[in-house]
Image: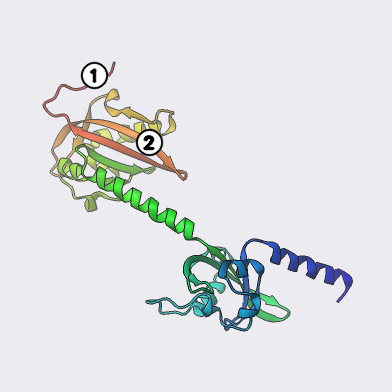
Amino acid sequence: MSNDDSAAAGFYRALVEGIPEAIIVSTQEGEITYFNPASERLLGYASSDVLGQNITMLVPQQPGQRADPVKWLTRWAAEPEHEQSRYLGLIARRNDGTEFPADVRVVEANLDGARRFLITFRDNTARRQEQIAFKEKNLLFSRILMVAEDGIVSVDAEHNISFFNIKAEQMFGYRADEVLGKPLSMLLPERFRSAHSRQVDEFGKGRTASRWMSERGPVTGLRRDGTEFPVDATITRVETNGRLTYTVHLRDSAGKTRRIAS
């Protein structure tokens, strides 16, 4: 090996051993051949404890899984490059026996003429807990909205219905499962659909986050049985993670004095 090659090898080794991400190298059969310092810190093993051992000691097969971890890694490594860049969610086990959710990514490489798996680990306990808390909060809010006194209908940027509460079911005569994913226009008389769609798009481009829809004229709903009814409606625009959602609050205004915009 030339001095240049030796220097390059030393540089790359120092780089791999200095980064904070756990990196493990194994044979195609799952035998561990390299275990960097970050792996030692994350999993609680010294490198000498795991070299020559099977990767399943770190990612044991879980109850209900049909394929063992080595088969998972083999299949994942054979995926196209853009698929390999995604992380698998697996359960890892530390030296003290505790288990934790881990993000695992694997690529296959040729090292000195031998096929090897290059595996990276991340502890995603905090992110998993955040996801659980987020789902629980969303579930709570969803249940509150589901039993609200107002009819509440949410649609995505393409105006397809994504939420339809109990009051909306009563107002329009549809079950939620009959309208979810379908266009909002089905709840409007045909003569209003085109203009309404344009108004919603214009609202989405504006700066106002919420407004009375009735400001531009009466709003009329269409029940499943074909009957029409007047509604008071407000629309709210929310954008999260680049995704636009419109939520409409509806009240049947039949027999009431209609609101007049000032």
Mark 1 or 2 closer to N-term? 2
Check the image and name the residue furthest to the left: 255
Check the image and name the residue furthest to the front: 96
Do labels 1 and 2 touch, CB within 8 Å?
no
Residue 43 visible in this rendered orientation of the protein = yes
Tell me the crowding category of disc 2: few under 14, some 14 to 19, or many 20 or more residues within 10 angstroms, Cα based.
many
Tell me the crowding category of disc 1: few under 14, some 14 to 19, or many 20 or more residues within 10 angstroms, Cα based.
few
Indicate the position of residue 229 as horizontal and vertical percent values: 15, 33
Marks 1 and 2, how far apart at CA: 22 Å
Residue type at tag 2: Arg
- Residue topped by disc 1: 260
Indicate the position of residue 67 as horizontal and vertical percent values: 44, 79
Indicate the position of residue 169 as horizontal and vertical percent values: 18, 45
Indicate the position of residue 96 as horizontal and vertical percent values: 51, 73
Along the line of sight, the residue nearer the viewer: 127 or 168? 127
Along the line of sight, the residue nearer the viewer: 69 or 210? 69
Residue 47 numbered mark, or none: none
Left or right position of 27 against 149: right
Residue 237 numbered mark, or none: 2
Residue type at tag 1: Ile
Q: Quadrant of residue 247?
A: top left
Element on which disc 2 rests: strand
Q: Quadrant of residue 256?
A: top left
Measuring 88% from the left and 71% from the top, which residue is drawn there? 3
